[in-house]
Image (cartoon, rainbow, N blue to C red):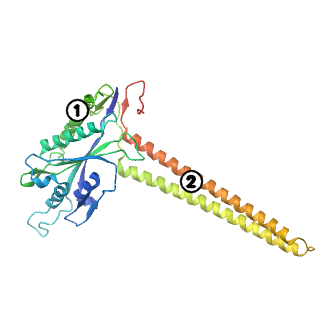
C-alpha cells in the first residue's frame, strides 16, 4: 500500500500584500470579477487548467451570496475602519480579506471523487464556522507533475448570516486555538479522501496520512517546504545564469567569426596586391578562387551558429527538465511508499 502524506496549506489573502479577494477568486475560478472597491476588472477566463468549481454557503445566507462576484465584493467592502477617528470608514490597508485552504488529491482518485471531496470539505467548513467556501479544482500544470490535481478553497474571514457578513472568525488565527483547528481540519480532509478512495475501490492501494511523524511514533524527520518565493527565486537565478551563459557564448563566437573574416579579407587584399605585380593571367579564375574561399568561411560560420543554437536549445531543455523534476519532488515531498513493487506512477 502506498502511504501518501497529506499536502495541505492554509494562507491568508492580505490587502497589504497587494492582494484582493476578488482577484483571488477570479484567478482561481478562471472567471471574471469586477472589483467594486477599485474598479479593476479581474478577467482570467483565458487562463485554462480548470477542472471544476463550487460555492457553499450557510443555509440561511442571503441570496446574493450564491454569486461569486457579489460574495467577494461584499468581503472587500466589509473591511473598513470604525466610525471614529481621522480615517473613519476608510478601507483598512492591513485587512485579511479571505483565507485559502489548498490541498492536493491522491492520483488514484477520479475526477468525480475529487469533486465529492471538495464539496464535502467546503460543506464541513461552512457548517463548522458559518463562513462561505468557494473552491476551484485545478488540473496539473503542463510542465509540472501530471498527478498534481489540487484544490484552492477560498473562505470568508467573517461569518455569513442572513444579514450579510458578520463577526470575524478568529479560531484559525489565534496562537492558542489555531493549531488545534488546523490539525482537526487536516484530520477531516484525510478521512474524507480515504472514504472517497474506498468508495472507488482504491483503499488497498493508497492511504492518505495526515499525522506527523512524531504523532505516529516515527523517528523520521519531516522535510521543510521551500515555499513559492524561494522556489521562484531559484528558478529566476537559473534563467539569469542561462541567459548570461548564452550571451557570453554568442558574443565569443561572433567576435571569433569577425576576426576570422578580417584575417581572410586581409589575405585577399595581399593576394590582389601580389597579383598586380605578376604577368597578366585569368582574372575570372583568380576571382573565383577568392570567392570560393570566402563562401567556404561563410558556410562554416553558419554551421557553427547552428551548432551553438542547438547547444543553447539543449541547455533550455535541460533546465526545463530540472524544473519539472523539482516540481514533482515538491509535490511528492514526504510521500513514502511501503511496497516493494512500484506501480506505474510511484517514484
> Which quarter of the rendering shows the C terminus?
top left
> Which quarter of the rendering shows the N terminus?
top left
Q: Nearer the viewer, residue 187 or 226?
A: 187
> Mark 2 touching mark 1, by CB under 8 A?
no
Q: Position of residue 272 (x, y in %)?
A: 83, 73
Q: Position of residue 66 (x, y in %)?
A: 15, 52
The label shown at residue 312 is: 2
Distance in Å between CA atoms under marks 2 and 1? 48 Å
Position above or below: 58 against 195: below
Q: Is residue 179 visible?
A: no
Q: Secondary structure at mark 1?
A: helix
Q: List the single residue furthest toward the right.
A: 279
Q: Is residue 252 visible?
A: yes
* Residue under the image location 81 percent in, 67 percent down: 288
Q: Nearer the viewer, residue 267 or 26?
A: 26
Q: Nearer the viewer, residue 172 or 264?
A: 264
Instruction: From the viewer's perspective, tell me whether residue 337 is left or right of residue 33.
Output: right
Q: Position of residue 126 (x, y in %)?
A: 14, 44
Q: Quadrant of residue 187?
A: top left
Q: Nearer the viewer, residue 46 or 198?
A: 46
**2 or 1: tag closer to the N-terminus:** 1
The label shown at residue 138 is: none
* Residue tagged 1: 191
Crowdedness of circle 1 by 10 Å Cα count: few (<14), some, many (20+)? some
Q: Position of residue 214 (x, y in %)?
A: 28, 31
* Residue under the image location 64 percent in, 60 percent down: 253
Amino acid at each position: 500500500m502506498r502511504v501518501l502524506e497529506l499536502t495541505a496549506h492554509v494562507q491568508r489573502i492580505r490587502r497589504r500584500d497587494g492582494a484582493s479577494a476578488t482577484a483571488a477568486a477570479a484567478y482561481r475560478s478562471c472567471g471574471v470579477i469586477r472589483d467594486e472597491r477599485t474598479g479593476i476588472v479581474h478577467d482570467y477566463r483565458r487562463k485554462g487548467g480548470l477542472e471544476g468549481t463550487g460555492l457553499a454557503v450557510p443555509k440561511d445566507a442571503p441570496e446574493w451570496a450564491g454569486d461569486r462576484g457579489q460574495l467577494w465584493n461584499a468581503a472587500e467592502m466589509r473591511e473598513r475602519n470604525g466610525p471614529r477617528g481621522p480615517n473613519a470608514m476608510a478601507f483598512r490597508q492591513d485587512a485579511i480579506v479571505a483565507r485559502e485552504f489548498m490541498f492536493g488529491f491522491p492520483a488514484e482518485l477520479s475526477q468525480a471523487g475529487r469533486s465529492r471531496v471538495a464539496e464535502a470539505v467546503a460543506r464541513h467548513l461552512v457548517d463548522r464556522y458559518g463562513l462561505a467556501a468557494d473552491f476551484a479544482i485545478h488540473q496539473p500544470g503542463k510542465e509540472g507533475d501530471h498527478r498534481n490535481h489540487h484544490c484552492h478553497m477560498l473562505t470568508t474571514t467573517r461569518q455569513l448570516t442572513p444579514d450579510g457578513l458578520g463577526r470575524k472568525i478568529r479560531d484559525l488565527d489565534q496562537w492558542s486555538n489555531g493549531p488545534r483547528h488546523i490539525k482537526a481540519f487536516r484530520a477531516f480532509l484525510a478521512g474524507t479522501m480515504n472514504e472517497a478512495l474506498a468508495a472507488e475501490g482504491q483503499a488497498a492501494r493508497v492511504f492518505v496520512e495526515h499525522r506527523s511523524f512524531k504523532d505516529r511514533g516515527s523517528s523520521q524527520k519531516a522535510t521543510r517546504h521551500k515555499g513559492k518565493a524561494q522556489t521562484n527565486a531559484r528558478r529566476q537565478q537559473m534563467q539569469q545564469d542561462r541567459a548570461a551563459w548564452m550571451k557570453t557564448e554568442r558574443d565569443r563566437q561572433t567576435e571569433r567569426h569577425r576576426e576570422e573574416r578580417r584575417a581572410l579579407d586581409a589575405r585577399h587584399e595581399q593576394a590582389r596586391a601580389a597579383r598586380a605585380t605578376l604577368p597578366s593571367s585569368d582574372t575570372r579564375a583568380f576571382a573565383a578562387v577568392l570567392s570560393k574561399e570566402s563562401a567556404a568561411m561563410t558556410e562554416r560560420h553558419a554551421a557553427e551558429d547552428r551548432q551553438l543554437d542547438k547547444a543553447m536549445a539543449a541547455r533550455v531543455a535541460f533546465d526545463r527538465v530540472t524544473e519539472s523534476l523539482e516540481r514533482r519532488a515538491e509535490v511528492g515531498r514526504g510521500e513514502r511508499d511501503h511496497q516493494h513493487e512500484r506501480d506505474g506512477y510511484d517514484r
